[in-house]
Amino acid sequence: MKHSFWTLDVFAENKAGMANWLKTDAPDPRRRHLLALIKQALPRELTPRQKQCVQLYYYDNKNIYEIAKLLNIYPSTVCRHLKKARARLFAVLQYYFDPLSKQNSGQS
């Protein structure tokens, strides 16, 4: 059986990708598990500013410049917060999914 691996790149690199991924109604258990993990990780793993940037960018569909103006920070700072948030979430998700992928492929 061929395994497909999910990364944050599936939905985190652009708003359209995330919006499409979140709107998918497929009853995929991996998708439900991933969403549950992201929902748990957001408040626990990100700084308050990262949470603000993620909320505004991915959920409120604001662009980098609008977020910068709202938060009174530079656009490059918004990009840095989003990049670090994606990296942190990826690390958390990798912690959960790497053991599963090794187990499913027969490695220990």
Image (cartoon, grey):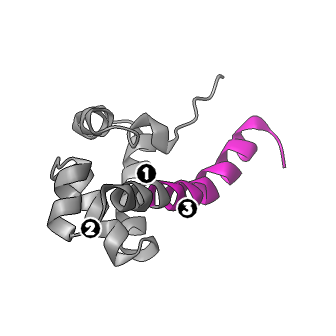
Residue type of the residue flagged with mark 1: His
Label annotation for residue 92: 3
Q: Which stretch is magenta? A: 85-108
Mark 3 nearby-residue class (10 Å; few <14, some 14–19, many ≥20):
some
Rendered view: 50 above or below 61: below
Q: Are marks 1 and 3 in contact (CB under 8 Å)?
A: no
Residue at 55 percent across and 61 percent down: it is 92
Q: Main secondary structure of the magenta part?
A: helix
Counting from the top left corner in percent of width and height, residue 31 is at 40, 42
Rendered view: 57 above or below 26: below
Quadrant containing the N terminus is top right
Residue type of the residue flagged with mark 2: Gln
Q: Are marks 2 and 3 in contact (CB under 8 Å)?
A: no
10 displayed left or right of 67: right
Counting from the top left corner in percent of width and height, residue 96 is at 59, 57
Does the magenta portion include 61? no
Does the magenta portion include 92? yes
Rendered view: 42 above or below 61: below
Q: Earlier in the sequence, mark 2 or mark 1?
A: 1
Residue type of the residue flagged with mark 3: Val
Q: CA distance from mark 1 to mark 3?
A: 13 Å
Counting from the top left corner in percent of width and height, residue 68 is at 23, 60
Q: Nearer the viewer, residue 61 or 43?
A: 61
Residue pushed farthest front?
74
Residue at 17 percent across and 49 percent down: it is 62
Task: Answer whether residue 25 is visible to the viewer in this image.
Answer: no
Look at mark 1 in the image and give the residue it sits on. Answer: 33
